[in-house]
Amino acid sequence: MKKILLIVVIFAFNSSLHSDSTIALKKIKPKTTIWQDLGSDLKYFAVDWGAYLTCPFRMDTKDLIISSSVIAGTVLSSTVDKDFRNAVSRRGFETYNHDFWDAPTAYGFVQYPSIFSGVLYAIGLATRESEIRKTGRMLAQALAYSGTLTIGLRYLFGRHRPFTSEKNQYEFSWLNTAGDTQSFPSGHIVVAVATSTILAEQIDTWWARVVLYGFAGLTAYARLYNDKHWLSDVIFGTALGYGSAKFVLNREREREQNEKQKLKKKGGGFSLYPSINGINAVYLF
């Protein structure tokens, strides 16, 4: 009873300063059930995937400028692919060589972040921690969406990897699925950058961004150093991984914003919504 009175007093005090007030109540449990959360997450996964695939048909001027810049940067960087390879890459090495570069290489191996996203989602779902659950779901979304496009582009271009292209960087076997013709774009980079973007932006601290984006950078260098990709493969893969993750994050932020708008339209009263610190109770005056 005392706790309820205390909340009412705080709300009354804050109403003189703001039109709405928020207090974190970590012990309050969400109203939805596990099955409801699972169902809504599956719906978001499917709806967002459709929006992702049809995104090129809804581009505005800003989107067109960014996309054109990425394509132009990829093409321009391809002109120095061979020189960059000669300066950076070591010849005759495998993907894993029992050295320092194995760790950042593994970071871009899609199975590991996929398993991590599943574990993260399961923990969030079971413990009713919505932010953990959403982070797991968004990571899975980013990996699935960017992976779809990566596989399609690899099949379409069939670009030869550096260690099979001693002549030049412009050897393509169109519509080919052979492993040595799967250079563009770099799948490891797409995975590493997408993973780092989701986790860094969800943690939302400077040190998380430094560590996670820095590790993705090491993954990029490892792929170049081990002679598995051209520079332009890495540049386009970086843009694809980052863009896919930001798309997923923006879709989630839009949903959260829409929920807040709905609360405001309903007028006064108590409402609950999840946050990174727990469950927030909001009273609108």
Image: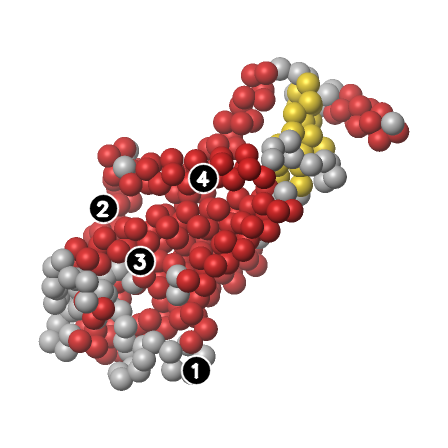
The residue shown at (66%, 43%) is 277
Image location (x, y in percent) of residue 122: 56, 50
Q: Amino acid at mark 3?
A: Gly
Which label's residue is closer to the chain start, 1 or 4? Answer: 4
Q: Nearer the viewer, mark 2 or mark 1?
A: 1
Q: Mark 3, residues whose alpha carbon is within 10 Å: few (<14), some, or many (≥20)? A: many
Side (left or right) of 77 relative to 19:
left
Question: Between 5 and 208, which is closer to the camera in this rendering?
Answer: 5
Q: Amino acid at mark 4?
A: Leu
The secondary element bearing badge 4 is classed as: helix
Image location (x, y in percent) of residue 58: 27, 33
The residue shown at (11%, 76%) is 167
Q: Which residue is mark 3?
A: 237
Which label's residue is closer to the chain start, 2 or 4? Answer: 4
Residue 99's disc is: 1
Which label's residue is closer to the chain start, 3 or 2? Answer: 2
Q: Which residue is mark 2?
A: 68
Image location (x, y in percent) of residue 139: 46, 50
Q: Which residue is mark 4?
A: 42
Distance between mark 2 and mark 4 Cα atoms: 33 Å
Q: Find the residue positioned furthest to the right.
A: 2
Which label's residue is closer to the chain start, 4 or 3? Answer: 4
Question: Between 274 and 237, which is closer to the camera in this rendering?
Answer: 274
Distance between mark 1 and mark 4 Cα atoms: 40 Å
Distance between mark 1 and mark 3 Cα atoms: 24 Å
